[in-house]
Image (cartoon, rainbow, N blue to C red):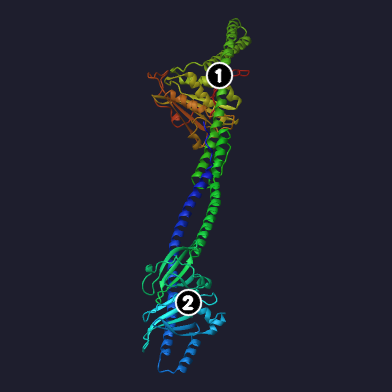
Amino acid sequence: MIKKLFIPLRFKILVSLLLLITVIVGVITFTMTNLFHKDKTTYINDLISTNTIHTARESYSLLLNYQERIQTITRVAYDTGVSQDEKSRMLNEFFEDFPEMIGITFYENGVGQVSLFDELSLTSVGLTKEDLDASRAQNPRPPPDLEPGKVFIRNSTFSEALPIMTMAIGTTVPGPASDLVLEAVIRTDRLISVVSRSEIFEGFILEPGGGLLVHKEPQRISDRDSTSWVPDSKALPEGSGLAATFEYVVDGTEMIGGFTRVGVGDLIVGVQIPRAAAFLSAKALFNNLIFVSFIILLTATVFSLIWSYRLTRPLVSLTEAARDVGRGDFEIKLIPTSRDEIGDLTQSVNQMAHELGEREKALEETQAALIQSEKMSAFGQLSAGIAHEVKNPLAGILGYTQLSLKKMEDDPVVYKNLKIIEQETRRCNSIIENLMKFARQDKPELRPLAVNDVIEDSIVLVDHQMGISQITLEKNLAEGLPEIRGDSNQLIQVFMNLMINAQQAMDGQPGTITVTSGSSNAGVVEVRIADTGPGMPEEVSRKIFEPFFTTKAAGKGTGLGLAVTYGIIKDHGGNIRVKSEPGEGATFIITLPVTVSGIYREEAPSDPPADMKAGEETSSRVHEEDQPGEGASPQRPEAGTEEG
């Protein structure tokens, strides 16, 4: 058979608690992370849209300013009311006030007429007019039929040192050249500063077709990096103040970007941020939640270990106590550590161990009593055999004494001595017969008995023992009592038990035991055995007939004597009770039913004497009528069962 693995209860509690806490913390962490992620996503989208719109508005304002300045130059250049010198002066001032513009060219019907350049700006970055012309020749040209009011803007950067754009505007002027296209080369430094204002987001401006027009990295502008990841312009909302956000991948990096129309030259403003950077705080929060969860689990582990140890430590003690009790050690005393079911169980185990210990002691005493009873039984059998052997010589002594009495009638002294021998021999013979009768282990047989005869036989057996203990044994036996039905041997045991218990209760002190018989009515006979001992309290008298209950020291009583007495009286259909007060002695009252015939030996009053009713007995000495003249009384055997 496979032995099951032993798993301590504290480990089960620990695992259960950790599993519960893990599930709870996991659900809370997942929920918080999910909610924060949704909230963060909304926040990031709103923030990107806001930055995109603000960048678009600033770019629109700046480009609109460029457009108005260029149109102002057109009006000045084609104003016929201004002299040529004045126009030259005004154009020079215009270049000074508009430092972003490097050059400007007027096209009439698709043919360039006049080109103006700011050579100082070109030379400051190490370029010449020829470099600019070569670059312009390679860049897309504005359409010659650009409608008035339309704006054409393209990236024309050819050097990282000089990020520029070409801005062409269709316009009309009075005169033969009514359709005019004005093309200006403008530095994009201010636009770059607009899109580079945020340190978190990456801003840029796209020309139609998706090419980079403005970016904070001039290298990317001059290289005209591909922007295939840019969403289709058709997906963007129409009108200003609106932006759309998208998620896409740029060179393997997940990005979140916002896009909107500038409103000038079909340009698009974009603002983007790496997704990882956007959710960096969310990741930090998630890491913090993981850390807090770990701390909670660690704390829960320590707490669970402590709690489970405190919870299961009493159970371990109870287990050890149960093992000790199983080995027969009942001297355990567990201290309850809590006021709960475990505390109650601890108290119950203490009580169980105490009761088992008491029962074991009672069983040991019972076993000792049974052994003693067996010894007494063997002693009784031996005594009966000895008594039988002694009875024969006594019969011979009695016979020869009686023969001698007939021959010594003339000698008074010898006759008197022989008479005493005859009397004492008869006395020894009577004692031996009673002893044999008591020792005989016959099956109980109820037959008509005279209760006074049974009392007399009992007194004969304990008389000598009482004399040794300085106990005066008095009797007050009513005459003419009706016969009872009983077993004389068992009733002798009852009366002997009660008298010996009274003698033992006096604990070696002189005292008196009074045996009284009478009849309170024609149906029962009453026997009272009273002593002048210390008495007993009510709580003791209530339990005195219970088996194994004793007030004697260990080894002096088994608690079975009165229980056996009680059982014998009940078997005879009678009743036994005790009246006692501390310091006033004890009186055992036995009532036995009379035989059906209710025959009296002599006439006797139906009512008991007045002194019996009042509980007062007239005493007489046992030995008054049957006391030898000289010499000690023969030794009598001690018998009976002790009180519990």
Mark found first going from the N terminus, 1 or 2: 2
At 54% across and 56% down in the image, what residue appears?
295
Residue type (three-letter) at the residue carrying disc 2: Ala
Secondary structure category for the residue under label 1: helix
Q: Is 441 or 265 nearer to us in this picture? A: 265
Q: Is 20 or 51 nearer to us in this picture? A: 51
Marks 1 and 2 sit apart, C-alpha to C-alpha, by 146 Å
Residue type (three-letter) at the residue carrying disc 1: Ser
The spot of residue 307 in percent (x, y) is 54, 49
Secondary structure category for the residue under label 2: helix
The spot of residue 177 in percent (x, y) is 37, 86
Disc 2 designates what residue? 137
The spot of residue 334 in percent (x, y) is 56, 42
492 displayed left or right of 108: right
Residue 418 in sight from this viewpoint: yes
The local crowd at label 2, few if under 14, some if 14 to 19, many if 20 or more residues have their Cα within 10 Å, is few
The spot of residue 56 in percent (x, y) is 43, 75
What number is the disc on residue 377? 1
